[in-house]
């Protein structure tokens, strides 16, 4: 969460995938890589998109709210995403177009299944 949001290589790679109409997936804290990515229209990629990621409550439950540089749930909302979540530690996935996000580690398998569906439809 410290270096990926502003990592030019990461941003360029994700933006290239988006421009090429390829699926993008991220689970748990990994959606942090999306917060500064721009879509084809020049707006933040996640603006107006349904996403999920590690919640403020999950961060608090693991005792890291004072350690991380910002709360991911809050930052995703600040960027204009349509953020949603379920109860802590339960698998939860959001798919919006070719963007797949998962809330927590338990969401890895269902998020991968959704990503595979998108890959098969290409």
Image (cartoon, grey):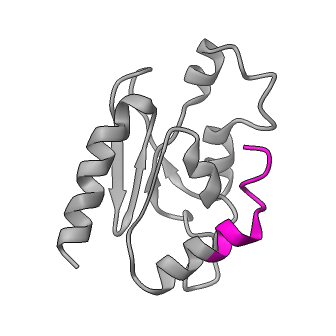
Residue under the point 60% across and 60% down:
34
Please say if 95 is above or below 61: below
Q: Residue at x 73, y 56 (%)?
A: 5
Find residue 49 and report its horizontal and vertical position in percent.
46, 61
The quarter holding residue 67 reads: top right
Residue 37 painted magenta: no
**Of the pair 31 and 73, the residue shown nearer to us:** 31
Position in image of residue 59 (x %, y %): 63, 23
Residue nearer the viewer, 119 or 57: 119
Q: Furthest-front residue in view?
A: 9
| Residue 113 against residue 61 in the figure, above or below | below
Q: How many marks?
A: 0
Task: Answer with left or right where residue 82 lies relative to residue 109.
Answer: right
Q: Residue at x 20, y 62 (%)?
A: 117
Residue located at (58% from left, 77% from top)? 15
Pinpoint residue 108: horizontal percent, then vertical percent. 36, 39
Relative to 11, is 19 on the left or the right? left
Query: Quarter of the image containing the C terminus?
Result: bottom left
Compared across the picture, whether 102 is left or right of 91 comes to right
In the image, which residues are magenta? 1-12
Query: Which quarter shows the N terminus?
Result: top right
Q: How far across and how far down the image is residue 78, in percent?
A: 68, 52
Q: Nearer the viewer, residue 17 or 76?
A: 17
């Amino acid at each position: 969460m410290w270096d990926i949001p502003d990592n030019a290589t990461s941003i360029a790679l994700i933006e290239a995938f988006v421009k090429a109409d390829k699926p993008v997936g991220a689970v748990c804290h990994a959606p942090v890589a999306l917060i500064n990515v721009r879509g084809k229209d020049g707006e933040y990629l996640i603006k107006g998109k349904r996403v999920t990621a590690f919640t403020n409550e999950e961060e608090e439950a693991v005792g890291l709210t004072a350690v991380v540089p910002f709360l991911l749930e809050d930052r995703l909302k600040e960027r204009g995403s349509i953020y949603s979540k379920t109860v802590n530690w339960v698998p939860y996935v959001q798919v919006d177009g070719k963007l797949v996000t998962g809330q927590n580690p338990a969401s890895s398998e269902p998020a991968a299944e959704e990503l595979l569906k998108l890959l098969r439809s290409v």
